[in-house]
Image (cartoon, rainbow, N blue to C red):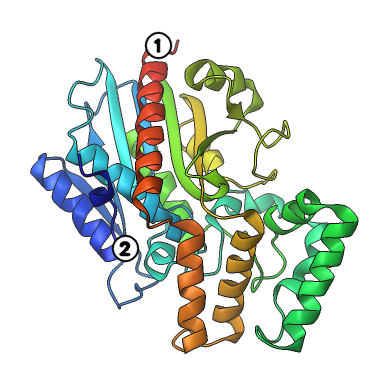
Amino acid sequence: MDVPGFFSATYAEARTRFLECCMKRDIRVENHLNERAKGADGEDLYMDVARIGPQEASRLLVISSGTHGGEGFCGSGIQVGLLETEAFQNLPADTAVLLIHAINPYGFSHIRRVNEDNIDLNRNFLDFTDGVPDNPAYHEVHEWLLPDDWDGPARAKADAAIQHYIEDKGLKTFQAAVTGGQHIHADGLFFGGFGPSWSNKTLRGVIAKHAKNARHLAFIDLHTGLGPYGHGEIIYVGDPEGLPRATEWYGDDVTSPEAGTSASAIVRGTIDAGIAESAPNASLTAIAIEYGTIPVLEVLNALRADNWLYIKGDVESTQGKAIKQQMRDAFYCDADDWKEMVWTRGVELINKAIAGVRRAE
């Protein structure tokens, strides 16, 4: 089995592979065009949805990729691998699988975490009629995260301030301040938006359609950038009452940001909220699989650089191209051993999800 061959070098290649695999298996695909943006090479951008199994199934497993754009290299590789190896040929009765390819196609194509409006989708699934949550800690660090220059005195001064903050309050506190999400600075990091994004609205429609008959819904969102190299951390997301069920399905290494056991900080407006609200008649067991790449501070610096580049820099410059490579390396390890680890862990947990949703009551 050529596991590294499941992974693609660009969004356009990944999409082509996904569609070709579905065509070979005679799987119908829904194509949702994002009319608000174009890809890095001017290509059209789509959220593609493939369903395997009966439409009336009461048990549904949803596997999604590319919520955070450039993390889609990993997620797409797993989805393509599942199709290439003809997984789900013998699904249990009354069970279906939904593959959602590139929830954030703009970010995937441009190798950005955010969408076309600088929105982090995992901070965007809120009820905006109730206003938006504040993040006072982010106010403290915003100006350091977006200095006036990237290779000059402003950056040096900002880095010194960040280092002092970490020494004073700790890395976990800094990570929480930065990554917890904010709805004030539209030019800042982890911006949750002022209203629902295209991906938010499109995904809700997809789930409402495909989960309308579901009584039990398992959701796996594929991510990269946190934790040890190649390890897939199981992060439970959603209603705390579902955590014991997730532990029963996946094992004792399930983590929870709320319990302080995860590499992820506590965040609000995550994608699982949109899934739950779009399938109100189903019990939801939602996890993110978070694959480690490089150390967390290096990941955050890549995100800082990318944000600075699109707000104050020149994407086509030599500096811009170096930053784009930095982003790619932060969220996708183009190495055979990493791909093998990602694939093996993914298949293991997907099989556990199918077994779990099958026996759910």
Position in image of residue 248 (x %, y %):
53, 15
Mark 2 or mark 1, earlier in chain: 2
Q: Residue furthest front?
A: 337
Q: Is residue 96 above or below residue 267?
A: above
* Residue denoted by label 1: 359
Position in image of residue 127 (x %, y %):
62, 48
Choose top left, top right, bottom left or bottom right for residue 83: top left
Position in image of residue 275 (x %, y %):
48, 38
Choose top left, top right, bottom left or bottom right for residue 158: bottom right
Nearer-the-camera pick, 325 or 284? 325
- Under circle 2, the secondary element is helix
- In three-dimensional space, the C-alpha distance between marks 2 and 1, rounded to whole angstroms, equals 36 Å
* Residue denoted by label 2: 11
What amino acid does circle 1 point to?
Arg
Q: Quadrant of the N terminus?
A: top left
Nearer-the-camera pick, 226 or 56? 226
Q: Is residue 154 above or below residue 283?
A: below
Q: Quadrant of the C terminus?
A: top left
Question: Can residue 103 be seen in this snapshot?
Answer: no
Q: Which residue occupies 43% across, 28% down?
A: 218
Badge 2: few (under 14), some or many (20 or more) residues near its Cα, within 10 Å? many
Q: Which residue occupies 51% across, 34% down?
A: 287
Q: Which residue occupies 61% across, 78% down?
A: 308
Position in image of residue 148 (x %, y %):
71, 86
Mark toward the viewer: 2 or 1: 2
